[in-house]
Image: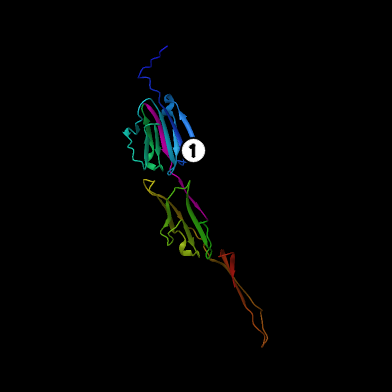
Amino acid sequence: MEYRFSSLLIIVLIAATLSNCAEVCFNTTMPLKQSYNNLTTVFPGDCVILHCTLNDTAQWGLNGTDISNDDTHYNINTTSGTLTIQEVRSTDTGNYTCGSGSISLIVQIPDIIVTGQYTDLTVGSSVSIICTTMPSISNSVIKWHSSSFNSNELIIDPVMLSHNNNTFTCVVSSDLLAINLTKSITISVLDTSVSSVTVQSLSSYVIGDNVSIVCTISLTNAIGPDVSSLY
C-alpha cells in the first residue's frame, strides 16, 4: 500500500536547550500550536541551542530578520536544524522563527548585589563593600566609580565624618551587555558630638600631694571599635 503526504503538511517543532555547549542543563519542547505562548528565559553568557525539526533546510530568523551563520555567535546547522547561540547577549532577546514555528527568548539582566555595611558607620572604623552580579556575567568588569580602587571591593579605612553622604557607584561592563549596569550607594556616618563632660578630682589637697584630675568626655556615638568615651 502506498501513502502520499501533501507538501503543505510541514511538521515544525522548536525545542530550546540551555547549556554550556558541553553539558545540557535544561530542555523544553513547545508544540507549534502553543509556540507563541511559551517564553524561555536566559542570562547573558548562557549557551542556548534551539532545535527546529522540519522537512526542509532550516532558516532561522530573529524578529523577522534572517540570521546569518557566523560561527562565532550564531551557528546554524542546516542538517540537524539547530541554532546555537554562543554566549547570549542582552540584544538576543526576541522572537525566533524556523519555518512556521516560533519561540520567544528573553535575556534577563542580572541584578547588582552590594554586600557590606555602608550606613550608620562610626568614625574610625573600617568597612569593605563588595559589588557583584547575581548571577555572575562571564568576563565582566566590575569596579567602583569615584574611588581609588579599580576592583569590585570598596574599602574605607578609616571612616571619617567627611565620608558622610558620599555617593559611590558600582559599574558593571561587559561585551554581552548593550549598556553598562550601575548601582549607587550613599555612605552615612554617625555624628560623634560630645554628649557630656565630667571632671573628677579631690576637693582639696595638702602641699606635697600628687594631684589627679580626670576629665571624661562622653560621645553621642562610639568612635572606632566601641570607643564611646575619651579621657
| Residue placed furthest toward the front | 1
Q: Determine whether 79 is above or below 70 in the image.
A: above
Q: Secondary structure at mark 1?
A: strand
34 or 208, nearer to the observer: 34
Disc 1 marks which amino acid? Val
The residue lying at 57 percent from left, 66 percent from top is: 219
Q: Is residue 91 left or right of residue 122?
A: left
Q: Is residue 157 left or right of residue 211?
A: left
Q: Is residue 169 visible?
A: no
Q: Is residue 95 magenta?
A: no
175 or 226, nearer to the observer: 175
Place residue 71 in its image quadrant: top left
Please report the bounds of the magenta region as a residue range. Answer: 100-116
Place residue 76 in its image quadrant: top left
Horizontal and vertical percent position of residue 180: 38, 49
Disc 1: which residue: 24
Q: Determine whether 81 is above or below 133 in the image.
A: above
Place residue 194 in its image quadrant: bottom right
